[in-house]
Amino acid sequence: MLCVRIAILALLALVFAQDMRSRAVYWLLFPVLTALFIVLAGFSVAAVINIVFLLVQFLLVSAYFSIKKRRWVNVMKGLLGWGDMLFLLSIAFYLSVLNFVFFYIASLLFVLLVAAKRYKHIPLAGLQALLLAALLITDWWIRPFNLTSDDWLLRLINR
C-alpha cells in the first residue's frame, strides 16, 4: 500500500502543478486517482453519499446563479472547471462523509484565503490537491487521524 500512497501523492502534486501553471489538468489523472483511492479505501456507501452531496451542491449553486441572472446558468461553463468537479468526485471515493464535507468547506475557505485576490481564474483543484496532500501525509505518517472514518471528527465535536 506504500506504493499506492506514493502514487496518490505524486498525482496530487501533478494536479497542483498543472492547475497552477495552466489552469487546466489532464482529465486522465482523475480516473487514475479515483482508482487508487478505491484500492486504499474500497467502495463504500460513503462514496455514494459524497457524490449525492456534490450533485446537490452544484444544483443549488446553479439554481442560485440562475435566479440571480434570471436565466438557467450551468456552473460548469465559466464558473467552475471540469477538473474541479472531477477532483471532488475522485476524493469522494476516499473520504468518509463528515471528512468529505469538512474537507470541502475547509478547502474552499483555504482557496478563498490563498487565491482570492491573486488570480483571475482560481486554481481550485490544484490548491485543493495541495491541501489534501498535506492532510494525507499527516494522516498516513505523522499523526494518524484516519480520513476514512468520522470518529476523530465526532470526538472533536463532542469535546
Image (tube, rainbow, N blue to C red):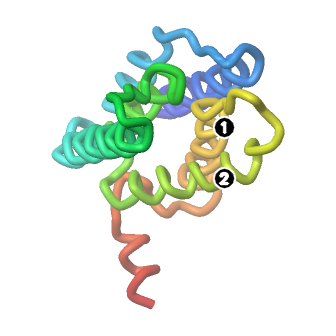
Distance from disc 2 to disc 1, alpha carbons, whole Å, reads 8 Å
Q: Residue at x 42, y 16 (%)?
A: 32
Q: How crowded is mark 2: few (under 14 residues within 10 Å), some or many (20 or more)?
A: some
Q: Which residue is drawn at 43% across and 43% down?
A: 68
Query: On the rendered structure, is 36 left or right of 41?
Result: right
With respect to residue 93, does 96 lie above or below?
below
Given the current orientation, which residue lies at the most extreme left position?
Answer: 45
| Relative image position of residue 116 (x, y in whole percent) | 74, 44
Given the current orientation, which residue lies at the most extreme right position?
Answer: 118
Label 2's element?
helix
Query: On the rendered structure, is 31 left or right of 4?
Result: left
Label 1's element?
helix
| Relative image position of residue 147 (x, y in whole percent) | 43, 54
Residue under pointer 2: 110
Towards the viewer: 84 or 6: 84
Q: Which residue is drawn at 75% across and 29% down?
A: 120
Mark 2 near mark 1, Cβ–Cβ under 8 Å? yes
Residue under pointer 1: 127
Towards the viewer: 1 or 126: 126
Where does the C terminus fall, quadrant-wise? bottom left
Q: Given the image, on which type of amino acid does mark 2 rest? A: Phe
Q: Which residue is drawn at 58% across and 22% down?
A: 11
Given the current orientation, which residue lies at the most extreme bottom position?
Answer: 159
Q: Given the image, on which type of amino acid does mark 1 rest? A: Leu
| Relative image position of residue 41 (x, y in whole percent) | 32, 40
Q: Residues within 10 Å of mark 1 (few under 14, many from 20)?
A: many
Query: On the rendered structure, is 159 left or right of 94?
Result: right
- Is residue 39 visible to the viewer in this orientation of the structure? no
